[in-house]
Image: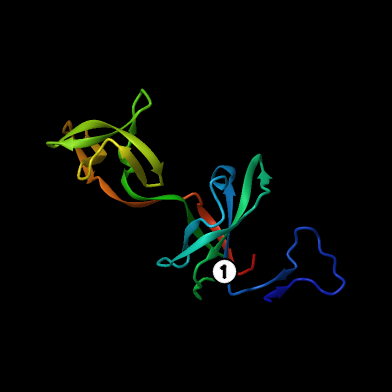
Amino acid sequence: MANVAINLGDTVSSGASAITLITAQKIANLSLNEVNAAKIKVGQKAMITFDAIADLTVAGSVADVDMLGTVTQGVASYAVKIAFDSQNDQIKSGMMASASIVIDSKADVWQVPSSAVKSALDGTNYVQVLIDGVPQNKTVAVGLTSDTMTEILSGISEGDEVVTQTINLKTTATSGSTANSATRNNASFGGAAGGGANFRAMGL
């Protein structure tokens, strides 16, 4: 027990914190908006980084998702708890951090940087592939996406050089392209939880 905020005979109001307990299991308390909370399920893996500990990343998993949201100025938010897979004495109660929750994953997929995928007027997606040094549009079918990468279901082959950025140089009337080769590997897609996770040493 870390703190007792009441004495014998005191009256405690609803929602007030009366006793703080510290356990060996550290829990991350997150508050997510309704769009992100709808994607979160118990058991999903998460990676947590800390504002005060730059080089530390801790793995965890979703332990609980609040079924009742809190509405503030017309916006609903839901509490999510992430249990740490391992303990680290550097992590202190009340530290601020960011958590990225993996909402889906696939093995052996094609993926390219999300910046390379463009939308055509007819609703299809395409990427630009360098052919003999010249960018050519290739229609692709996309799957899962993360903050940085997009799964490509069809349309490109391994080794294709996909243009991820085009820079127009107005002064010389020329342009330059940055290309990455398409790769096939395992991928995780998520990032539903943003910054502001509050870590408290407490039990569920």
Indicate the position of residue 114 as horizontal and vertical percent values: 34, 42
Figure quadrant of the N terminus: bottom right
Indicate the position of residue 162 as horizontal and vertical percent values: 24, 40
Figure quadrant of the C terminus: bottom right
Q: Residue at x 17, y 31 (%)?
A: 173
- Is residue 114 at all visible to an observer of this figure? no
Query: How crowded is the residue under tag 1: few (<14 C-alpha within 10 Å), some, or many (20+)?
Result: many
Lateral position of residue 11 relative to residue 84, left or right = right
Lateral position of residue 105 relative to residue 33, left or right = left
Badge 1 marks a residue whose secondary structure is loop
Name the residue tied to disc 1. Answer: 26
Indicate the position of residue 115 as horizontal and vertical percent values: 33, 41
Q: Residue at x 53, y 46 (%)?
A: 39
Report the coloring of the rendering: rainbow
In the image, residue 174 above or below residue 24:
above
Q: Residue at x 25, y 45 (%)?
A: 182
The quadrant in which residue 64 appears is: bottom right
Q: Nearer the viewer, residue 23 or 12?
A: 23
Query: Hey, what amino acid is under mark 1?
Result: Lys
Indicate the position of residue 111 as horizontal and vertical percent values: 31, 45
Residue that protrudes farthest toward the top in the picture: 122
